[in-house]
Image (cartoon, rainbow, N blue to C red):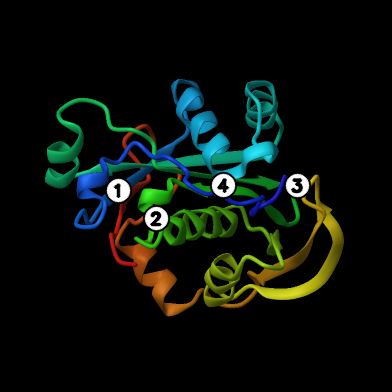
Amino acid sequence: MTADRPGAPAGAQTDLPHTVQQVYAPACRLRPLRSTDFDRVLQLERVLFGAGAWTFGMLADELAALGRWYVVAEPTGPDAVAVYGPGPKPVVGYAGLWFDGDVAQIMTIGVDPAYQRHGVGRELLRALVERSRNLRAGAVLLEVRVDNDAALGLYEKAGFERIGLRRRYYQPEDKDAFTMRLDLSAAAPAEETAAEGAGAEGDGGDDGPGPVGDAA
């Protein structure tokens, strides 16, 4: 399990109405992943990762394993009420890590295609990095497909560096992966520190970690 798995198939469907997809500027909040989110997360898995999607059993085993920490993003604010109505809003992103006592490994990051390029993935990544710092991890590791330019750009902007190549890592697609590493021994970047101070994420209770900005 890695931060990047085979991408969404052509024509992937989302729950965001087509008529508002081009004008909707979503704001989201992050909170811990709950068992009641399983159906929605698995739905997004199938949209995003096709044949590589996790099953219910795989997701349950992953969350039950030692050292795991998972969060989800859900829409919030007046725009979300206008689009989805009152009541619970659908999960539009999720992410998780594994901490082995030394380094943190990002296991997955997934964002509803309708919410991609709105900063949701960036804030999920930032939450994982902050959690890793709080756990006093020495570094954060991940794997990403060599042809996933968008993900590579996101990780490199966050300070990750390529440290290796894993041939034919993704199956059955037979795609190579870069292993990337973020050194946490250095001071946090100014942008990340500012976001942490504003309460952008953390490991709070059901009402936290907090809001996600809607910047690209």
Q: Are marks 1 and 2 in contact (CB under 8 Å)?
A: yes
Amino acid, disc 2:
Val
Name the residue: 47% across, 43% down: 12
Place of residue 17 in the rendered image (x, y in percent of width and height, measured from the top left): 26, 40
Determine which of the numbered discs, if any, sits on residue 100 in the image: 3
Image: 36 above or below 187: above
Place of residue 25 in the rendered image (x, y in percent of width and height, measured from the top left): 22, 57
The span from disc 1 to disc 4 (Cα, nearest Å) is 25 Å
Closest to the observer: 41 or 163?
41
The span from disc 1 to disc 2 (Cα, nearest Å) is 7 Å
Q: Is residue 60 left or right of residue 78?
A: right
| Nearest to viewer (mark 2 / mark 3) | 2
SS class, disc 1: strand
Along the polypeptide, which appears first: circle 3 or circle 1?
1
Place of residue 172 in the rendered image (x, y in percent of width and height, measured from the top left): 80, 45
Place of residue 120 in the rendered image (x, y in percent of width and height, measured from the top left): 39, 55
Amino acid, disc 1:
Cys
Q: Which residue is mark 4?
A: 9
| Nearest to viewer (mark 4 / mark 3) | 4
| Label 4 packing within 10 angstroms: few (<14), some (14-19), many (20+) | few
Q: Are marks 2 and 3 in contact (CB under 8 Å)?
A: no
Q: Is residue 23 left or right of residue 42?
A: left
Q: Which residue is mark 1?
A: 28
Along the polypeptide, which appears first: circle 2 or circle 4?
4
Residue farthest along the right direction in this orientation? 167
Q: Which residue is mark 2?
A: 120
